[in-house]
């Protein structure tokens, strides 16, 4: 069943999350995209009627995310939350993504070596093997499947479990609770329950790693002894969720976008050397962190000619920034040959995505392998029946029935 839109429009100002409604499901919500053209720094309203500033253009988004006077600390008054549940999560068990330096840098430094480009590149054969094994199983005696459950989700799940040292056998458990945490529809009670379950899971895992260390990231974090038990648990939860939900949704949404743009698909099939650049273009065009990146001003700040007073919340809509024609001519067009490297799909500034080398490697391998091994890949249902994730903090599709 197709999920309902996340919200209905507020009578006075744009309600966030804004509905995509009848527009193209790959494009930003029409209201937010209109703001970029007409009033690029504009006021909007959150679920609890609190106001938030939308920053919609590429240059302004980089100004905000690049300036520490816009704080990522979710405990500061005025910090904007998308739902009551998100607020519960960020305040009760914070991790470094919602902290400022120096606390943020202290934790990030413990992880940078593990996610460096060179370290991640060494995982290529392993990721390729996982992709091939999944496609072997998916195609074995069959000519149709749900690409999300058979390929796009298990690929990054298996990889992040391997990296962290989390048993993949528990995937049904942590995938279900991750979904609850990311759903804009979850009640505060549901969020609290799933969060507690995941934190308890991570605490048990930390204890296991203390007794029987392995060479995974989680074991090393535990062995360093610099983080408290609660900090370890919320960090493990963040890495596990960020590590599989994002790449999984990019993989399935990218596949769908290519199937909907057969000319671009044909270019990639003809010249696989384009895949690397196509991944950047798909990251730009699809921008799955679709609702935006939140901050709060700690001083009166001027952005795009508007004054954002100290203590007021800001949402950087990176999906509209990635369509900004000043940086990406014909930004609403998917063009796998374009140089899209200036996109802000991974954010910008000190919080820029830690996992981006891994995400890039996984996406490159997933797309190249899928196109090479399934030359006749096609949708198995009409496009109109695809259930888009309007109801989730990370955009994508709930299912992608394909045939070959
Ligand atoms: C941060 C997007 C994959 C781990 C971020 C941010 C964005 C983002 C926009 C910035 C948030 C902010 O500034 O508030 C994405 C996308 C991905 C992806 C689009 C895939 C296509 C991954 C993967 C991991 C990961 C595979 C692996 C663990 C993180 C972490 C942060 C982060 C730990 C926080 C960094 C910090 O605050 O310093 N990501 N991400 N992400 N991402 Fe990713």
Image (cartoon, rainbow, N blue to C red):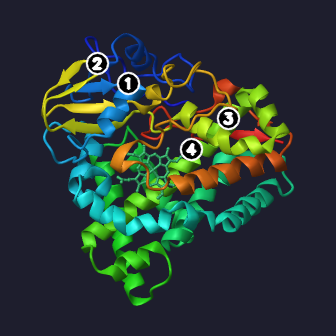
Residue 65 horizontal/vertical position (percent)? 32, 39
Rendered image: mark on residue 256: 3
* Picture quadrant where residue 332 is located: top right
- Which label was assigned to residue 42? 2
Q: Mark 4 vs ligand 1: CB under 8 Å? A: yes
Is disc 3 surrounded by few (<14), some (14 to 19) or many (20+) residues within 10 Å? Answer: many
First in sequence, mark 3 or 1: give its number. Answer: 1
Q: How far apart are marks 3 and 4 (CA)?
A: 11 Å
Q: Could you give the CA–CA distance between mark 3 and mark 2, rounded to whole angstroms? A: 32 Å
Residue under circle 1?
Answer: 56
Per the image, the residue denoted by label 4 is 249
The reply to whether the C-beta atoms of the residues labelled 2 and 1 are less than 8 Å apart is yes
| Residue depicted at 72% across the width and 26% down the height | 261
Q: Which of marks 4 and 1 is in front?
A: 1
In the figure, 155 relative to 302: above or below? below
Q: Which of marks 3 and 4 is nearer the N terminus?
A: 4
Mark 2–mark 4 distance (CA, rounded to whole Å): 29 Å
Q: Is residue 214 above or below residue 9?
A: below
| Residue at 56 percent of width and 57 percent of height | 358
Relative vertical location of residue 105 with respect to residue 339 in this rendering, above or below: below
Q: Is mark 1 on a helix, strand or loop?
A: loop
User: Is the residue marked by circle 1 packed among few (<14), some (14-19), or many (20+) residues within 10 Å?
Assistant: many
Residue situated in front as seen by the camera: 264 or 305: 305
């Amino acid at each position: 069943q197709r999920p309902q839109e996340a919200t209905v429009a507020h009578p006075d100002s744009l309600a966030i999350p804004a509905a995509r409604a009848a527009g193209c499901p790959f494009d930003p919500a029409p209201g937010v995209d209109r703001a970029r053209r007409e009033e690029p720094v504009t006021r909007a309203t959150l679920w609890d009627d609190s106001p938030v500033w939308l920053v919609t253009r590429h240059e302004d988004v980089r100004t905000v995310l690049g300036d520490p006077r816009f704080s990522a600390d979710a405990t500061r008054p005025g910090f904007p939350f998308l739902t009551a549940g998100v607020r519960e999560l960020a305040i009760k068990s914070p991790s470094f993504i919602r902290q400022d330096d120096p606390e943020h840098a202290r934790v990030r430094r413990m992880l940078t070596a593990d996610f460096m480009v060179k370290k991640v590149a060494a995982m290529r054969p392993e990721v390729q093997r996982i992709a091939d094994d999944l496609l072997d199983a998916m195609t074995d005696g069959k000519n149709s499947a749900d690409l999300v459950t058979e390929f796009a989700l298990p690929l990054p799940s298996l990889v992040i479990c391997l990296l962290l040292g989390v048993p993949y056998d528990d995937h049904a458990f942590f995938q279900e609770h991750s979904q609850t945490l990311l759903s804009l529809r979850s009640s505060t009670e549901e969020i609290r329950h799933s969060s507690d379950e995941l934190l308890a899971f991570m605490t048990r895992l930390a204890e296991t790693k203390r007794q029987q260390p392995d060479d995974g990231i989680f074991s090393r974090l535990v062995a360093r002894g610099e983080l408290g038990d609660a900090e370890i648990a919320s960090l493990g939860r963040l890495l596990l969720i960020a590590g599989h939900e994002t790449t999984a949704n990019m993989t399935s949404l990218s596949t769908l976008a290519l199937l909907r743009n057969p000319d671009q698909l044909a270019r990639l099939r003809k010249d696989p050397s384009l895949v690397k650049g196509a991944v950047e273009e798909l990251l730009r065009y699809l921008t799955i962190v679709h609702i935006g990146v939140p901050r709060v001003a700690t001083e009166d700040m001027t952005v795009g000619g508007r004054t954002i007073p100290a203590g007021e919340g800001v949402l950087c809509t990176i999906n509209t920034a990635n369509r900004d024609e000043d940086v990406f001519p014909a930004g609403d067009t998917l063009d796998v040959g374009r140089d899209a490297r200036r996109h802000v799909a991974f954010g910008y500034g000190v919080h820029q995505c830690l996992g981006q080398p891994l995400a890039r490697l996984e996406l490159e391998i997933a797309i190249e392998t899928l196109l090479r091994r399934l030359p006749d890949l096609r949708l198995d249902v009409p496009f109109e029946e695809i259930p888009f994730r309007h109801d989730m903090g990370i955009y994508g599709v709930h299912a992608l029935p394909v045939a070959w």
